[in-house]
Amino acid sequence: MKAIKRIYLSIILIFLYAPIATLIAFSFNESRSRGVWGGFSLKWYESLFQNREILRALNNTMLIAAISALAATAIGTAAALGVNSMKKKPRKIFLAISNIPVLNPEIVTGVSLMLFFLFTARLMGRGGLGFVTLLLAHITFNIPYVMLSVLPKIRALDSSVYEAARDLGATSFTAFWKVVFPQLLPGVVTGFIFAFTLSLDDFVISFFTRGAGVSTLSIYIYTSAARRGVNPEINALSTLMFVVLLLLLFVINWRDARELKKNIRNRRKDV
């Protein structure tokens, strides 16, 4: 039985990671071919940093991901605090409404946001889609995910800690910032990373809400692949992004493990 489980797990891991391993291997391929190995080379990495179109798309992607993640984290954390303070029935209704963008198909969200932005632009007598609409779209679909990350931390809080800080003379802001927020920080950081990753990965919503001349990496890869096939420089870029995200994942897991050990030590001291 154990052997069957191991074989089954191995097959799943192969299906998950074999394509990524292939992409990484061919990012070092001397040949432009996607099926023939022509020898080891770093020329596609050198060419990557000389390709202005890819660097421009990368710059847009990273800028939108960083700004939208920060904005969504701030709004989502505030919304989670507000939802938690509601009574039971309104809280359920609001949570159900806020979960709609998570369950909604991306193409529906993308088309609806595009129509909304075009309608708003016509009412205001300004231009249509562009960098700002793309940024607003990313902030919009990231907010529910931040709320889902922060709400469990809020529910785990001991409300008496905040009240004790207020009784000791702290203002509302000081009590929140120095007592409550540090306990929410793991959930806030998780929400930020989640939003940042989703923004990097998004294609459908970005495709419908971008303007002419505005491109992200996912859109660039799609349009360039449609015209002339996947450029080997994309393999190099994807490899670099995979390595960065893998390192980020290791850092998050290390931080969570360290926090868990710290909590266990504190509980033993209390006992």
Image (cartoon, grey):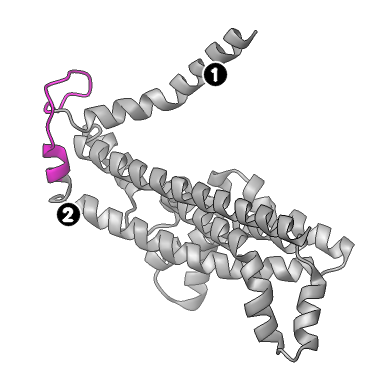
Q: Is residue 102 visible?
A: yes
Identity of the residue drawn at 34% across and 42% down: 243
Front in this rendered view, residue 204 or 88: 88
Identity of the residue drawn at 59% across and 60% down: 186
Q: Position of residue 169 (x, y in %)?
A: 74, 92
Q: What amino acid is found at the position of numbered circle 2 in the picture?
A: Arg
Q: Which residues are magenta?
A: 30-47
Judging by the rendered image, the residue that carries numbered circle 2 is 52
Secondary structure category for the residue under label 2: helix
Q: Position of residue 108 (x, y in %)?
A: 58, 47
From the image, which quarter does the N terminus lie in?
A: top right
From the image, which quarter does the C terminus lie in?
A: bottom right
> Earlier along the polypeptide chain: callout 1 or callout 2?
1
Front in this rendered view, residue 264 or 92: 264
Q: Which mark is residue 120?
A: none
| 40 is higher (above) or lower (below) than 126 | above
Q: Is residue 248 magenta?
A: no
Q: Does residue 12 appear left or right of residue 31 in this picture?
A: right
Front in this rendered view, residue 200 or 166: 166
Q: Position of residue 97 (x, y in %)?
A: 73, 57
Identity of the residue drawn at 57% across and 70% down: 74
Identity of the residue drawn at 59% across and 65% down: 185
Q: What amino acid is found at the position of numbered circle 1 in the picture?
A: Leu
| 21 is higher (above) or lower (below) than 131 | above
Judging by the rendered image, the residue that carries numbered circle 1 is 9
Number of marks drawn:
2
